[in-house]
Image (cartoon, rainbow, N blue to C red):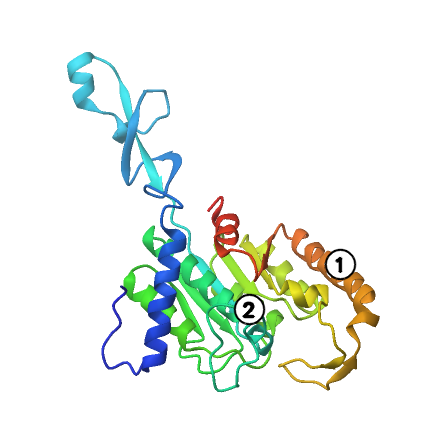
Amino acid sequence: MVALAQGTGWDPDVLARIRVLELRARDLVQGYLHGAHLSGRATSNVEFADYKEYSPGDPLRDLDWRVMGRSDRLVVRRHHAENELATTILLDASGDMATGAAGGQPSAARPPLKGSKWGSAAVLCATLAYWLQRHGEPVGLMVLGGQDVRWPYLPPRIGEAQLARILGVIAQTRPSGRADLAAGLRAAGQRMGRRQLMVLVSDLMEEPSEWGPSVATLLRRRIDLRVVHLHDSREWAMTLDEPGLFRSPEGGDAIPEDPDEIRAAFSEEVQRYLAEVRSSLSAVRGAHVLAPTDQPLDRVIARLLRGM
């Protein structure tokens, strides 16, 4: 288990959720990838790879004089370079993330880690942080919206202490308010260095026209963006049988609707919305990973980690 400093004020509920998050993350990561996370690039540091015949222009410092003394051959030592990639996880903690099959909890309660969009997001972020920490790569966290957020931003670092902080923040946070994706993407992009990785975990329940321009700025900084788009399949399919009042946890008036009357039009609106999301992300070569909350998380994790 990750070590949490004593006397830091974590209440028993949060500590229990941290333990569950770590166990779920470890189970999802276990057996997915094996071995050291080394790239195939040949450079002059970290770990010996093999020899190659000397060619004019090769650095003389890489010549292996012992081999030359034994065989009169000029050979150059080549090395693997550790592929360290700083990653910042953006976690949407808006009020809408508390919904789902097990949503609708009292505002004072934290949504369960299974059966809600927030639960899926929490486990996904914990798993990604666990995987990166296991491979010795820097990982950070930025929480967008929410309440009881102990550290809204943790810059990328390596080590178990960083993983403990990230799991603690995720476990303690309660979804609330708006995420303001546009402002969050801008702020994260300004804090990140060039050629880093950003992973946004969100239900994207804000208009793409609002956050799309902020995504475009990431391309200029050569930031690799991957978006995990959480959604409840029942909501998108409008499978409710009875008329009722529809309201957003993020505010606004309740709207009376009959699901049978609006189902077809709602389906068309979902497809229009998805096309707009994909257009905004494809313009900056951002990866879009759809993550239905009723499907096993290991599939989403595999798609997200593939190529990292």
Residue 259 vertical position relative to residue 199 in the rendered view, above or below: below
- Residue 138 seen in this snapshot: no
Q: Is residue 82 left or right of residue 174?
A: left
Q: Residue at x 40, y 66 (%)?
A: 155
- Residue 19 seen in this snapshot: yes
Q: Is residue 185 left or right of residue 20?
A: right
Position of the N terminus, as image quadrant, is bottom left
Q: Secondary structure at mark 2?
A: helix
Q: Amino acid at mark 2?
A: Lys
Query: Where residue 3 appears, x then y in whole percent?
Result: 25, 68
Residue situated furthest top in the rendering:
72
Residue situated furthest front in the rendering:
241
Measured in 3D between alpha carbons, the distance from the residue under mark 1 to the one under mark 2, in whole angstroms, is: 20 Å
Q: Residue at x 42, y 55 (%)?
A: 86
Earlier sequence position, callout 1 versus callout 2: 2
Q: Nearer the viewer, residue 121 or 99?
A: 99
Q: Secondary structure at mark 1?
A: helix
